[in-house]
């Protein structure tokens, strides 16, 4: 029996591997007067000056044929074959210094945006839902025995803009964990409803059938598709605007026709989401709030 094929769409925090490093040409020139940034991997065992930065990285040897780099939330990881000398590794690092430092800068900036958008689980806190801000309102009269939640649209009494309020059936002395869990339960219900609706919308256009939807909490994937028609989507996609959700849904459904990322696959995505390339960038450029 043929095994199931699974393809995935990377989550924002996934490490970004670079193609294996080619033979080094020459070190990147460095401005001695430029400010020196510092990046340090928690398991760093080597350090190098790359472009304008000091980079402490994790160095690993293994059964591979070439030198490879991976930049993730923790920092830089360098992998090399056992037979490659240290001098050759250092030369490859210098050759790709600009790429490495740029990716480290981008990853740090993304992490800082996430910290800045960290949700305070209390009455009056705000979080994004479908690209718009929603304010949490604790309302003990709203059946807090089962922590019921209801979305309300409230118009400012002074004629200001309308605001979205999420009324939670919780007492005012509810703990942060109780508030967070109630909000998560509501968001997951909305996610299943919205994802099902969008899967049903795009599947006929692509000429495919999806058979099962599972909500994911994976740390490194926005979604995945299997050849048997099973779709997994990260529930926190509901923080994004609908156009982003549509792109991810269309991406995974397109894998039911083309189980790779070949040009034919991207043409399939384009057939239902013509501006997918621009929308795709939002998954990297827009940060979802830290959930803790």
Image (spheres, rainbow, N blue to C red):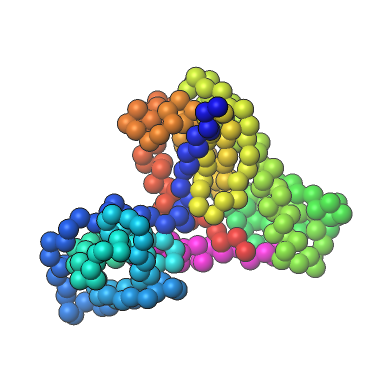
Considering every residue shown, the one lying at the far bottom of the view is 33
| The residue stretch that appears in magenta | 103-123
Q: In which quarter of the image is residue 268?
A: top left
Q: In this view, does 197 lie to the left or right of 257?
A: right
Tally of marks: 0
Residue at 41% in and 41% down: 279
Viewer-proximal residue, 239 or 3? 3
Q: In this view, does 29 lie above or below 273?
A: below
Residue 230 horizontal side relative to residue 176, left or right: left
User: Who's the residue at 50% across and 52% down the image?
Assistant: 220
Q: Does the magenta stretch include residue 107?
A: yes
The vertical placement of 226 against 118, above or below, is above
**Quadrant in the picture for the N terminus:** top right
Percent across and percent down for residue 219 are 54, 54
Answer yes or no: is residue 243 visible.
Answer: no
Q: Is residue 268 visible?
A: yes
From the image, which quarter does the C terminus lie in? Answer: bottom right
Give percent across and percent down for residue 55: 32, 73
Residue in the image at 35% along x and 65% along y: 61
> Which residue is found at the position 45% from the left and 55% from the top?
14
Please tell me whether the stretch drawn in magenta is mainly helix, strand or loop.
helix
Q: Is residue 203 toward the left or the right of residue 273 in the image?
A: right
Front residue of 275/91: it is 91
Residue 229 part of the magenta segment: no
Front-most of 101 and 187?
A: 101
Image spot of residue 90 (x, y percent):
22, 70
Above or below, 21 relative to 188? below
């Amino acid at each position: 029996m043929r095994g199931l094929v699974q393809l995935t769409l990377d989550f924002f925090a996934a490490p970004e591997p670079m193609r294996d490093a080619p033979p080094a040409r020459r070190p990147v020139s460095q401005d001695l007067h430029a400010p020196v940034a510092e990046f340090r991997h928690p398991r760093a065992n080597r350090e190098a000056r790359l472009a304008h930065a000091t980079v402490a990285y994790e160095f690993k040897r293994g059964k591979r044929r070439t030198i490879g780099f991976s930049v993730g939330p923790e920092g830089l990881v360098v992998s090399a074959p056992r037979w490659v000398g240290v001098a050759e590794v250092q030369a490859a690092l210098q050759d790709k210094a600009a790429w490495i430092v740029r990716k480290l800068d981008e990853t740090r900036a993304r992490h800082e945006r996430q910290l800045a958008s960290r949700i305070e689980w209390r009455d009056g806190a705000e979080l994004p839902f479908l690209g718009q801000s929603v304010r949490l309102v604790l309302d003990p009269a709203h059946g807090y025995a089962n922590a019921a939640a209801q979305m309300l649209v409230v118009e400012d009494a002074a004629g200001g803009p309308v605001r979205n309020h999420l009324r939670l059936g919780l007492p005012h002395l509810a703990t942060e964990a109780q508030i967070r869990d109630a909000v998560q339960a509501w968001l997951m219900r909305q996610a299943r409803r919205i994802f099902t609706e969008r899967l049903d919308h795009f599947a006929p256009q692509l000429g495919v059938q999806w058979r099962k939807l599972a909500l994911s909490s994976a740390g490194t994937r926005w979604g995945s598709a299997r050849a048997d028609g099973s779709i997994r989507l990260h529930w926190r996609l509901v923080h994004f605007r609908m156009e982003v959700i549509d792109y991810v849904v269309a991406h995974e459904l397109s894998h039911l026709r083309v189980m790779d990322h070949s040009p034919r696959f991207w043409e399939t995505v384009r057939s239902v989401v013509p501006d997918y390339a621009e929308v795709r960038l939002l998954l990297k450029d827009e940060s979802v709030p830290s959930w803790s």
